[in-house]
Image (tube, grey):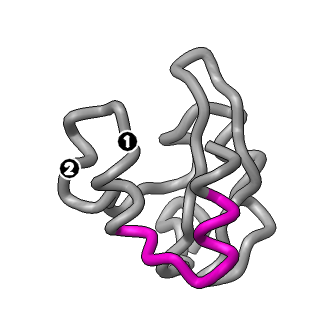
Amino acid sequence: ARAVREKLLAGGNFENLAKQNSEDPNFAEGGRLGTFKAGDFLPEIEEAIQNLKEGQVTGVVRSKLGFHVVKVNRIQKIADPKFN
């Protein structure tokens, strides 16, 4: 995971690196996780991405599922209808 992150920071393509290095067969499409809302991920990943801006990547995140490097592609804040 550290070597992949270093390649990313050196300008590597996230999607290609995910295809080549992910051990999860669901990430054969370039590691895209899709759209999600707060609370959808493991706490370790949520903590790692909470202050990132679009285009930034996390450090190596360790969870019960293994090691992860996450890239934030887009941030979209949506109003919660319960608070309108």
Q: How many marks?
A: 2
Q: Secondary structure at mark 1?
A: loop
Which residue corresponds to mark 1?
22
**Rendered location of residue 55, percent (x, y):** 59, 83
Near-viewer residue (30 or 1): 1
Near-viewer residue (79 or 37): 37
Residue drawn at x 39%, y 46% is 21
**Rendered location of residue 35, percent (x, y):** 35, 63
Q: Quadrant of the C terminus?
A: bottom right
**Viewer can see residue 78:** no
Outermost residue toward the top in this view:
64
Give the vertical position of 11 relative to 28 (above or below): below
Q: Earlier in the sequence, mark 1 or mark 2?
A: 1
Res. 28 mark: 2
Near-viewer residue (50 or 14): 14
Residue drawn at x 51%, y 77% is 12
**Rendered location of residue 78, percent (x, y):** 50, 76
**Rendered location of residue 2, percent (x, y):** 70, 47
Amino acid marked by disc 2: Ala
Magenta span covers which residues? 5-15
Q: Name the dominant secondary structure of the magenta segment.
A: helix
Q: Secondary structure at mark 2?
A: loop
Near-viewer residue (81 or 36): 36
Q: Quadrant of the N terminus?
A: top right
Residue 42: in magenta span = no
Q: Quadrant of residue 11?
A: bottom right
Give the vertical position of 10 relative to 5 (above or below): below
Amino acid marked by disc 1: Ser
Pointers 1 and 2 in contact (C-beta within 8 Å): yes
